[in-house]
Amino acid sequence: MQFEELIGNTLIAEQLKASIDKSRVAHAHLFIGEEGSGTLGMALAFATELVSSKHQDPQQRDSCLIKCSHFNHPDIHFAYPVVPTPEFKKPVSDHFIEQWRNFLIDQPYGNLFDWYQVLGVENKQGRIGVNEASEIVKKTSLKSYEGGYKVLIIWRADTMNTETANKLLKLLEEPPKDTVFILVADAVENILPTIRSRCQMSFFKRISESEIEVALIDKGVSFDKAKELAHRAHGDLNKAFDLIHNTSEDQVFARWFVHWVRTAFKAKGNKAAVHDLLMWATEVSKTGRETQKNFLNYALRMMRQALMANYGVDKLCFMKVEVDGFDFDKFAVYVHENNIELIVEALEKAMYHIERNGNSKIILTDMALELTRYIHKKPTGIK
């Protein structure tokens, strides 16, 4: 991937390109941006520009760019979250390099959920472990194959455990000559302060609706449909691409959400409905933890959208629920100032405990029952 192929955040691309042209490249970068904002694509483009910048001969440069486009350039290395398997008890990124290359070719704007789908992860959560840190030290100690820059892209650096991060601190502070680290993460608060202080940080904005529209039209989507999908994607290009093919996980999450809130409405004083809530929690808990976390994030966004709709701020309502018989506007009136904080707190608490490997069936059951209480609270002034 090259800079001219990127969508969105052109100012960051220009600044990175200028740093190469002026030979003022920082040795460690941290790209921060929400899913679908293009942080990974930017890292790939920056790495491509770095390793090809030393080639004055057009043929050598073209050969270099071809290797970069297949993600097998010997001077560009990768680290990313992986999980133990029967074959690899102490996994490192290179054990899954072919899957990674295919992932980059198919989904350069993909997210962690997409990557776990490629790995076939169920209830495990990927990590960049201490064994990976040892591999990174080895890779950066090698001489550059083509005599220019060496680049190490650490995707989802927020999945590094503390031991791994601490092992890389010295390397990030004093890397070998012409070695550049590019760390990619979703949120700056998930990166240790000691890591942040050693990196030049770039904060990515959501991709604009107009830019997403153009990208969708380039893929053959009609103007009207592109406009609708760009609005629903809310700055997430990966989601926009998923919506083209109806492969977005949001479609499954919408069915779960509607079933959940409908049953919660019925559950007050209704034992049969309470049983349905327990069955719902059981079904959702059978999915992988990353899927559960993504669903809870989806539910959180839906509740906030409902609050906006209830108070007439329709411009901020970008999500669409395509479930037969569900009227989002009628649901929205039940989300108001007297229960939104309680609902958000319950969802965030559930997410926190699932991230820490709690029993998801118990966590989701407790959350489902809490919603039953909160959704029946009356707005201010209504008895």
Image: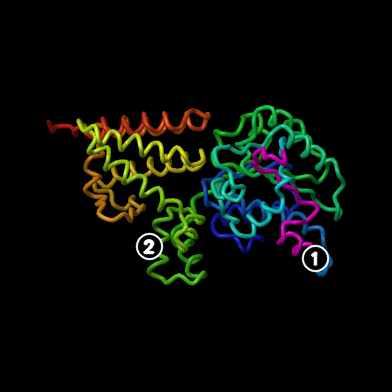
Sooner in the amino-acid sequence: mark 1 or mark 2: 1
Q: In the depicted view, which residue is nearer to us: 360 or 109?
A: 360
Amino acid type of the residue tagged 1 in the rendering: Ser
Is 224 drawn above or below residue 194 in the view shown? below
- Residue 63 is marked as 1
Going by the image, does 127 lie left or right of 262? right
**Mark 1 burial class by Cα count in 10 Å: few <14, some 14-19, many 20+:** few
Is 323 drawn above or below residue 86 in the view shown? below
**Quadrant where the image shows the N terminus:** bottom right
132 part of magenta stretch? no
Residue 335 at x, y percent in the picture:
26, 39
Task: Residue at 26%, 43% (x, y): give it.
Answer: 262
Q: Which residues are the magenta region? A: 61-88
Residue 180 at x, y percent in the picture:
75, 45
Going by the image, does 289 lie left or right of 74? left
67 part of magenta stretch? yes
Q: Are marks 1 and 2 in contact (CB under 8 Å)?
A: no
- Residue 228 is marked as 2
Instruction: Look at the image and name its color scheme.
Output: rainbow
Residue 72 at x, y percent in the picture:
76, 56
Residue 330 at x, y percent in the picture:
21, 48
Where disc 1 sits, the SS reads helix
Going by the image, does 174 lie left or right of 288? right
Task: Residue at 54%, 33% (x, y): give it.
Answer: 189
Q: In the depicted view, which residue is nearer to us: 195 or 333?
A: 333
Amino acid type of the residue tagged 2 in the rendering: Glu
Q: In the depicted view, which residue is nearer to us: 27 or 342?
A: 342
- The Cα atoms of the two marked residues, 1 and 2, are separated by 40 Å
Q: Residue 106 appears in which quarter of the rendering? A: bottom right
**Quadrant where the image shows the C terminus:** top left
